[in-house]
Image (spheres, grey):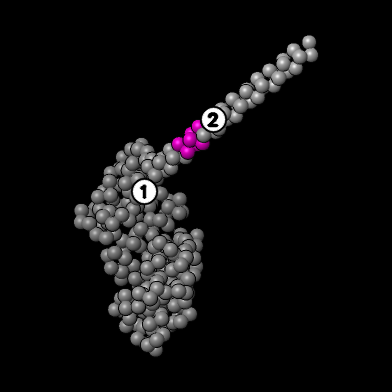
Amino acid sequence: MPIPEDVTGDEIDADVRQELMSLPKTLAEDVARNLVMVANLLDEEPEQAYAYSRVALRLASRVAAVREAAGFASYATGKYSEALAEFRAARRMTGSVELWPIMADCERGMGRPERALAMAGEPEVQKLDKAGQVEMRLVAAGARKDMGQAEAAVVTLQSPELASNAVQPWTARLRYAYADALLEVGRETEAREWFAKALEADQGGTTNASDRLAELDGVEFTDALEEDAENEAEAEVEVKDEVKDEVAEPAEAEDVEEAKDAKDAKDEESGSQG
């Protein structure tokens, strides 16, 4: 896989660099550069990120950071079974529980929400930091919805973190999920309130709370660029029609003149015969 020259591998986190020190220097540099490409492309070009992750995996499958990166790339492309296998491998290597929520979400992706829900009740959840526990709650609520338990999803999301006025990196997503769950059970007024709260906390644009609010308020957005393109197309058609008419008019005039000349010639011939 081609890697731009300005990607050196030094961009990776210090802890990942520490893991790569177990590899020969040149190999460590190659792996690091591929991991940087995975990180750079994961959000916008997940298929490309996946391809780079496979290269890193072939080079250093015994490095936990590589297995984790491969897991996230697989997850981003919807390869949930593959992602789960990579996350499990990374967890065996590190003993860390931080991947527990996304492992549970992989179970959801594989159509096994009951397993995701069971994972939400395991002791590993208590070892997660606050962000991890909130993430696990979001996954559990999603599993409830997958199982058709919309009311239970609402209850699952009700927590001190939801009630808090403090804004954390996960606040917008938690409020958004709660609003969405409320809307699903028909509590539209409350849903609108929580979409507004989600928007208020969403400084990084991680949700589409503004669109959901507009939808509830009956506001329709039009794409200005699309309208301009349509107007230009209509104008172009009009110009072509005008040109066609201008071309047609002289031709019609010439036809009239030719017909007149033919008639005059015929009359003249008839007169001479008489």
**Circles 1 and 2: CB atoms closer than 8 Å:** no
Identity of the residue drawn at 31% across and 65% down: 132
Identity of the residue drawn at 38% across and 52% down: 153
SS category of the residue bearing label 1: helix
Q: Looking at numbered disc 1 in the image, what kind of residue is underneath it?
A: Asp
SS category of the residue bearing label 2: helix
- Residue 229, above or below 160: above
Identity of the residue drawn at 47% across and 65% down: 47
In-front residue for pair 205/232: 232
- Residue 44, above or below 66: above
- Residue 53's disc is none
Disc 2 target residue: 245
Give how far across and how far down residue 172 sits, in percent: 29, 54
Identity of the residue drawn at 37% across and 68% down: 40
Give how far across and how far down residue 78 sits, in percent: 48, 62
Q: Quadrant of the C terminus?
A: top right
Asked whether residue 87 is drawn in magenta, I would say no
Q: Is residue 106 left or right of residue 255?
A: left
Give how far across and how far down residue 222 sits, in percent: 38, 40
Q: Can residue 58 be seen in this view?
A: yes
Asked whether residue 236 is drawn in magenta, I would say yes
Give how far across and how far down residue 223 sits, in percent: 39, 43
- Residue 147, above or below 9: above
Mark 1 packing: few (<14 Cα in 10 Å), some, or many (20+)? many
Q: In which quarter of the image is residue 247?
A: top right
Disc 1 target residue: 180
In-front residue for pair 88/15: 15
Helix, strand or loop: magenta stretch: helix
What range is drawn magenta here?
234-242
Q: Looking at numbered disc 2 in the image, what kind of residue is underneath it?
A: Asp
